[in-house]
Image (cartoon, grey):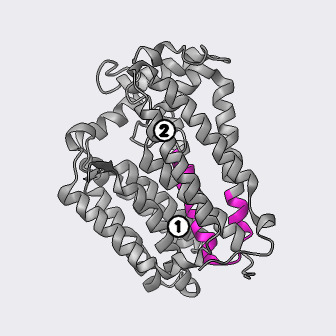
Amino acid sequence: MVGLKRKSLKNFDFVLFITVLILCAYGLLMIRSATLSFGTLSFIKSQAIAIVLGIIAIVILTFLDYQFLGKLYIPIYIACNLLLIAVLIFGFGEKEWGSRSWLSVGGIVFQPAEFVKLGLIISLSKFIDNHKHSINEPFTLLKILAFAGFPVLLILLQPDAGTAMVFIFFIALMLFAAGLDWKYIKYALTAGLISLPIIWFRLDGYQKDRIFDFLEPERDAVGTGYQALQGKIAIGSGKIFGRGLFQGVQTQFNYIPEKQTDFIFAVLVEELGFLGGMFLIVLYFIFLKRLIKIAKNTDDLFGSSMVIGIAAMFVFHIWENIGMTIGLMPVTGIPLPFLSHGGTFLLVNMVCVGIALSVGMHRDGLNF
């Protein structure tokens, strides 16, 4: 299982690792500011513990040959689906957040879908690799879509459309990168457009309100549109240099709901301004570029598919979260990687980085 390389240090992506550490530190700083008015250090402590555990996970995974994950893809896939079924039976969160997406085990509350994202990326990557020579045959493609679609269906039943969109996005990019014929992509886009009316009538009321608020931000400024409006006020007031760290009016006076999680970007830009927001975006650009480089330099389809899926997952989170806070996307419960508070989410992000670093380290297969 352990396959350290003679050129391990040469293959280790220090730029990616250091970028992740800077992002974690940046997130810790902004969570401290976002929760300063709460008068508690519990948020910062839990995030710091997740960072430490994440760094340990990165170190362990980096020096393990990622191929061992491929041997476990069936158990991983089964475990993911069992978790999602458990959420449907024992989960909670419908009254608080509009979907039954959380589980509590031994007093620990977590969102299983965060683990399932990574689990499906791993298992689907191996499933694609096993069928790489016949991926464009209709029967093979149907098997792959059924394999990937079942956990997505379970998530839609919670219902959690935002998380389901993340899954659909990285599944599509993984298939495209594996060599899916363009005709199937055209069929999928056509089917998606045709199904829009059906999807619309199946949306819950609060989901429709989010779309209406996106199209007309002032339609319910003190109700369903309050969060988005307050976030944009915070971002606009930050201007170029920001109001100053711990000095944001919208932030420190608690005008922004979920400011330590979904709307952490609004906190950052209000207090650190356009420059602070651009610094974060540059960090994300470097981070994603390094992931793409690892995927391109990996000849093994299993390894490259995993990294592509991981990169796609991050792209969707970054785009959707920043987009919804500045009014370019409807509001969803999609957190910002490495910035938003949430131990489960952060730990999964770090594990993803560890797997990507392992792919980069072991891509030439030279063991000793």
Q: Is residue 313 magenta?
A: yes
Along the viewing direction, whichever of 65 and 123 lies nearer the viewer: 65
Can residue 94 be seen in the rendering of this structure? yes
SS label for mark 2: loop
Q: Please name the amino acid that badge 1 sits on.
A: Ile
Q: Is residue 8 magenta?
A: no
Residue wearing tag 2: 340
Using residue 283 as the reference point, say whether residue 197 is left or right of it: left
Quarter residue 362 falls in: bottom right
SS label for mark 1: helix
Q: From this view, report whether residue 94 is shown above or below residue 133.
A: above
Quarter residue 257 falls in: top left
Along the viewing direction, whichever of 66 and 316 lies nearer the viewer: 66
Q: From this view, report whether residue 170 is shown above or below residue 100.
A: below
Q: Tag count in the figure?
A: 2
In this picture, which residue range is highlighted in magenta?
A: 291-317
Q: Residue at x 39, y 52 (%)?
A: 163
Q: From this view, report whether residue 325 is shown above or below residue 232.
A: below
On-image quarter of the C terminus: bottom right
Q: Residue at x 43, y 34 (%)?
A: 43
On-image quarter of the N terminus: bottom right
Task: Measure the C-alpha gap from mark 1 to mark 2.
Answer: 33 Å
Q: Position of residue 234 (x, y in %)?
A: 51, 19
Residue wearing tag 1: 185
Q: Please name the amino acid that badge 2 sits on.
A: Ser
Q: Which mark is residue 24?
A: none
